[in-house]
């Protein structure tokens, strides 16, 4: 089972300012080292602010590119950690240990969501196409 731990953005994280709190960086490094030692860490990184990104909107068969920044920081993600664990309970336990994302005294929030696996879908030729892609990616 794979889960994504998403760090919700704040007005401060949207400025693009790098964290200068060495205590926070140390806590994050230690946490991610623990995940790696446990063999559950798949990926983790921070995201650049939305001012450097864009969205593609789909409506009535058309695509429209909208450049950032985006006003609603509560809807944005500042970073993520992707883990693979044996159960929802294990993911919950790891997420409880996640360091306060902007420091112990700063407001912050993480959201945890389970990823779909190919096994969650009915067997169809298109699901098989995704399985082939996954297997090819794993060997390269």
Image (tube, rainbow, N blue to C red):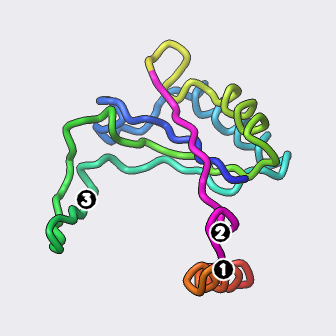
Q: Quadrant of residue 99?
A: top right
Label 1 or label 3, whichever lies nearer to me, is: 1
Give coordinates of residue 134: x percent, y percent. Answer: 65, 78
Residue farthest to the right?
A: 38
Q: Residue at x 17, y 74 (%)?
A: 61
As for residue 120 lying within the magenta part, the answer is yes
Lower sequence index among marks 1 and 3: 3
The answer to the question of whether label 1 and label 3 lie on touching residues, with beta carbons closer than 8 A, is no
Give coordinates of residue 131: x percent, y percent. Answer: 66, 80
The residue identified by callout 3 is 55
Tell whether 36 sits left or right of 9.
right
As for residue 137 lying within the magenta part, the answer is no
Q: Residue at x 73, y 39 (%)?
A: 88
Q: Which residues are magenta?
A: 108-123
How many numbered tags mark residues here? 3
Q: Residue at x 55, y 16 (%)?
A: 104
Lower sequence index among marks 2 and 3: 3
Q: Residue at x 21, y 65 (%)?
A: 58
SS at badge 3: strand
- How far is mark 1 from mark 3, CA to CA? 28 Å
**Number of residues whose C-alpha sits closer than 10 Å to that of mark 2, classed few (under 14), some (14–19) or many (20 or more):** few
The answer to the question of whether label 1 and label 2 lie on touching residues, with beta carbons closer than 8 A, is yes
Which image quadrant: the C terminus?
A: bottom right
Tell whether 41 sits left or right of 102.
right
Residue 118 is labelled as 2
Label 2 or label 3, whichever lies nearer to me, is: 2
SS at badge 1: helix
The residue identified by callout 1 is 131
């Amino acid at each position: 089972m794979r889960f994504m731990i998403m760090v919700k953005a704040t007005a401060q994280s949207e400025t693009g300012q790098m964290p200068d709190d060495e205590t926070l960086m140390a806590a994050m490094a230690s946490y991610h080292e623990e995940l790696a030692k446990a063999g559950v860490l798949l990926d983790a990184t921070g995201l650049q602010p939305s001012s450097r990104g864009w969205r593609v909107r789909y409506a009535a068969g058309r695509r429209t590119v909208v450049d950032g920044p985006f006003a609603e920081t509560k809807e944005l993600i500042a970073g993520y950690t992707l883990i693979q664990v044996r159960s929802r309970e294990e993911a919950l336990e790891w997420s409880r240990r996640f360091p306060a994302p902007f420091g112990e005294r700063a407001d912050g929030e993480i959201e945890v969501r389970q990823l779909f696996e190919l096994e969650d879908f009915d067997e169809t030729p298109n699901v098989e196409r995704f399985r082939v892609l996954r297997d090819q990616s794993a060997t390269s």
